[in-house]
Amino acid sequence: MLLLALLNSPAHAAEVDLEGYYRARFRMYDTLSLNHDLASAEGTSSVVEHRLWLRPNILVNDHLTVRADVFGLDGVDWGQSPSRYGDPVSGQIDPVEWGDQLTPPVPDAEFDTRDFFRDITLAHAWAEVDTPAGRFSFGRMPLHWGLGIWRNDGLGYNGDEGDTADRLMWDRVFEDVFVEVALDSNSENLVNGNDDTFSASGTVGYRTELITTGVVAQYRLTPSRDFGLFTIDASFAGEIGTLDVGAEAIGQYGKGNLEGGRNDVTVAGFGGVGDALLHTSAVDIGVELGVASGDPTPDDAQIATFTFDRDHEVGLVMFEQPMPVIADALATDGRSYVATLSGRGVSNAAYFKPRAEKILTEGVVAHASWLAARTIAAPAADRSGYGNEFDLGVRYEPDEHTRFDLTGGLFLPGGYYSAYTDDTNDTLTGFNDPVWAVQVIGQARF
């Protein structure tokens, strides 16, 4: 009995709650080159991608919770990294046509510059401590605010990237009012220098069962370059009878020197989005309006462009895929971006997106949308319009954990692409062909 007492160790009970999802996503485009007649046009492109997201919430006791976000095969293509057997007798490697082993992808430091090839990644880990003075959180945690045009955690149904901060945060709720103060480490460089980037932010808001609204103010500083950036973001989301309404507006102002040698710059950009969805017995009708400031002279010291977070998705093609792209067998992903005029994320743009949804039968919903966009600062008088996109699809949800979504889209390029000419390469022109797109998503959530 004495020996058993000496061998006994204390047991710490903890409850673990697990949430997350697995998603498979198929995308096909024809053609993102916007010109089938180019010698280097890529034609049809397609890919199927994995994503596993796991969030274990470790409830240590009534006051302490430790959370983490783990991603598996995130952005890995189906069929990527086949492993082939090499015969030690003949020295021949088996053809891929009769191999059945796929290995976790490993980045190649010499040939592969993409940072999303990974098997298992611990993206976030943080602790939350509840005290009589409020809740204290510390660690690497995801960031999200409002409709996600500035801070977006990328954990949504069709997310990819996600915003993160190494953060020390205090928050407290006073009945319907919530307050938050946070210090973030955004970039750590030399441990004995002042070349780091960090920020401080404060949030105040009001939340009820039907309405959530608030304002975030942040100041970001890089002392070594004497650069400071002030951001203020206001957000609103609410239910007014059968109408769902959401809005977010952001303004940024900063001065100093930027990494890469751009000195004495001034940053002044703004963005905003508004969304409304009306529920009726026959059909749900909605509209989204957005604007992101542009810069008529992007190479000078006055930076006026604001770009939405890349995980705030607007269209299947527009602002979701870089365009135009050129086929390049020597590039890492088989593409060249020498002729690319627009990237991912709403930038230098104003857009209008009406949409409708209708329940066809239990668990099956048809949806359609039209997206029209133009530039804020046009590079030329005939290059003001990005174009129009028409999307049509159907969503099937057999239960609360499973969702399948099939969407087809047609993008018609505007003058921003079709009127472009390259003074150094007269073959990079004629970007006026339509783009056909298909996306299929299957998600199992728990």
Image: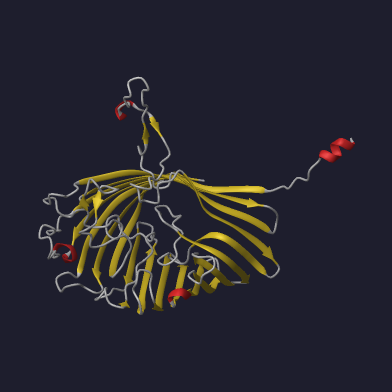
Question: Residue 394 location, x and y as percent?
Answer: 33, 48
Residue 273 found in image quarter: bottom left
Query: Residue 83 vs residue 144: left or right?
Result: left
Question: Residue 279 location, x and y as percent?
Answer: 39, 61
* Count of numbered marks: 0
Q: How is the image coloured?
A: secondary structure
Vertical placement of residue 226 versus 189, above or below: below
Question: Residue 35 location, x and y as percent?
Answer: 14, 54
Q: Nearer the viewer, residue 324 or 351?
A: 324
Residue 191 found in image quarter: bottom right
Residue 49 visible from this viewpoint: yes
The residue at the point 66 percent across, 48 percent down is: 15
Question: Residue 135 location, x and y as percent?
Answer: 64, 66
Vertical placement of residue 278 versus 93, above or below: below
The residue at the point 35 percent across, 37 percent down is: 79
The residue at the point 38 percent across, 67 percent down is: 275
Residue 400 visible from this viewpoint: no
Name the residue furthest right.
Answer: 2
Q: Quadrant of the N terminus?
A: top right
Name the residue furthest front.
Answer: 192
